[in-house]
Image (cartoon, grey):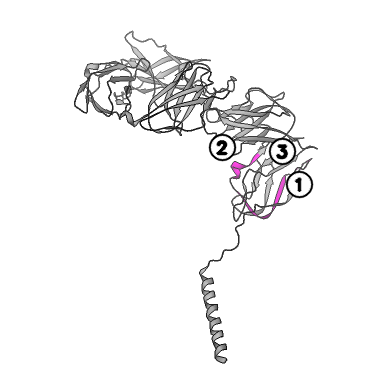
Amino acid sequence: MQRRIFNIIVLGIVAALILLRCANRGTASGGEKDTTPPVIVKEVPENFSTNFAADEIKIYFDEYIKLKNIQRQLIVSPPMNPEPEVTPLGTASKYITIRIYDTLQPNTTYAFNFGESIQDNNEGNSFPFYRYVFSTGPTIDSLAVKGVVTDAFERETPELISVLLHEVDSTYNDSIIYKQPPKYIGVTDSLSQFSIENIKEGQYLLTALKEENTNYTYQAKRDKLAYRSAFITVPSDTAYVLKLFQQQPDFKFVRARQLAHGRIGFGYEGDLNAMSVKLLSEVHDSLEFITSKASKTDTLNFWLKPKEIDLDSLKFEVTGPTQIDTVTVRIKNMDSDSLSIKAATSSLKLGEILNFNSNIPLKSVNSDKVKIMDKDSTLLNSILSLDTIDAKNAHLKFNLTEDNNYQITLLPGAFTDFYDVQNDTLTARANTKLLSSYGDIRLNIRNATYPIIVQIVTKNGEVEAEHIAKSSGPIDFVSLTPANYFIRVIFDSNNNGKYDAGHFLNKIQPERVSYAQDLLEVRADWSRIVDFTLED
């Protein structure tokens, strides 16, 4: 009997040890993860207070919170100047403090929109879209303006676009968006929608800005703008649609200066076609000159021949759309430009021409100075010609066949520049691929208003192919590089063959642009027919 009891005790001890060993293999869970956002327990003064006269606001939470990206997330409407001070910054606290330093406007409803900046300190759970609202008058304004902002040209719309309402009163003028913050501010959400709330009845200019530096005033050189052409009246049930665009800078002559021996540069902003340059100084009749656009800067180059001028300075007249400037350029002893010519690419498709770019305008070309040999060592005939628009460009045309390599030699005298300088011997290579390496698309556009510009664009917005259609009919895109593309259609309303953005002061909206929703898949050695119906 005693032995039986002893055995039972031993077995119990062994079982306990086994259970303890198994338990030690586990890891303590620490409980379930906290997924609950912080909770507001008190607001001083209370949210939606009227006759507000405080200079400090405190918002208390049930746990420690932190503010993330508060500089980007917080929208104060109407804006305050100086801006309010909001804490904590970089530390945790159980309350938010807002200190107001601006003199508040009478009978005005203010709103602090925190976006998604409020998070609990431990897990980062967000307290989304908290708004603290008060009025300096006896009532809270309760009207709202809603809508959506889309990019006028790009397929994707930027995030966090500011939507602005300027009050149309006796002080209003069109330049207000350049100089003065708006009466009310909203911001787009993840779906590019906006809702500006707690505004009062009245008439407003509705705009949207994607700013480089957020100050709610329009900087045309840097910011994207959208605007409603007509003033809006609040209250309104309309859901407004705004098209965001980068405005083409208005023409402005910047300065003129000598850049090299025999070359004077005229810097400008905006459209080069709006500028003309005239030499006013009295010079010898043998003096020749030509102009060309600089390749990388907004500069019009004015080339003089001969380079040697017995004058200390030259006087020019620069004419733009709205003004005429007279400028004097001092002539100094500077180094001359050396002729440099390069092929624009080495990969060609059947039917294309090989372009050459020169840093100095070309006077003439000579096809007899060109030798082209393919991979079978066969000499090919070719035609070298000057570009009829830009004298710095030349075109080499020869018979291309698929899956071939070409060795191109341009002997001295193939190119002669404006100063009668000829090229040294140049060599270039070009190649073609098998036709089966490419894909073809026949595109049928439905419900179009012509003319339109049809583009095949990459996911990054680069144009792979383009066709200008003046009337209905199938559009063939051949020899497309295999990839996934988007179809973009530009409604060329002014029939100038390019996309035109809007202009605020001239009350011009951007041209309409439509994208096909589905990706266009192009495969090698493959042809397909695609239908794209444009919405009304």
389 relative to 175 in the view: left or right = left
Task: Please tell me which of labels 1 and 2 falls first in the chain.
Answer: 1
Q: Name the residue under label 1.
A: 46
**The quadrant where residue 302 appears:** top left
What are the residue bounds of the magenta stretch?
47-75
Amino acid at the residue labelled 2 = Glu
Whether residue 51 appears in magenta in the rendering, the answer is: yes
One can see residue 178 in this view: no
Residue 301 left/right relative to 156: left
Percent x, y of residue 490: 50, 23
Q: Tell me the amino acid under the disc marked 3.
A: Tyr
View extreme (left): residue: 377
What's the residue type where badge 1 is placed? Glu
In the image, residue 120 above or below residue 448:
below
| Residue at the right extreme, as displayed | 138
Provide the secondary structure element on which disc 1 rests.
Answer: loop
Could you tell which of marks 3 and 1 lies nearer the N-terminus? 1
In the rendered structure, the answer to whether residue 329 lies left or right of residue 146 reads left
Residue at position x 26%, y 28% in the image = 404
Disc 1 crowd rating (10 Å Cα; few below 14, some 14-19, many 20+) is some
Residue located beneath label 3 in the image: 110
Residue density around tag 2, few if under 14, some if 14–19, many if 20 or more, within 10 Å: some
The number of callouts visible is 3
In the picture of the structure, the residue carrying the numbered disc 2 is 159
Dot 3 or dot 2, earlier in sequence: 3
> CA–CA distance between discs 1 and 2?
32 Å
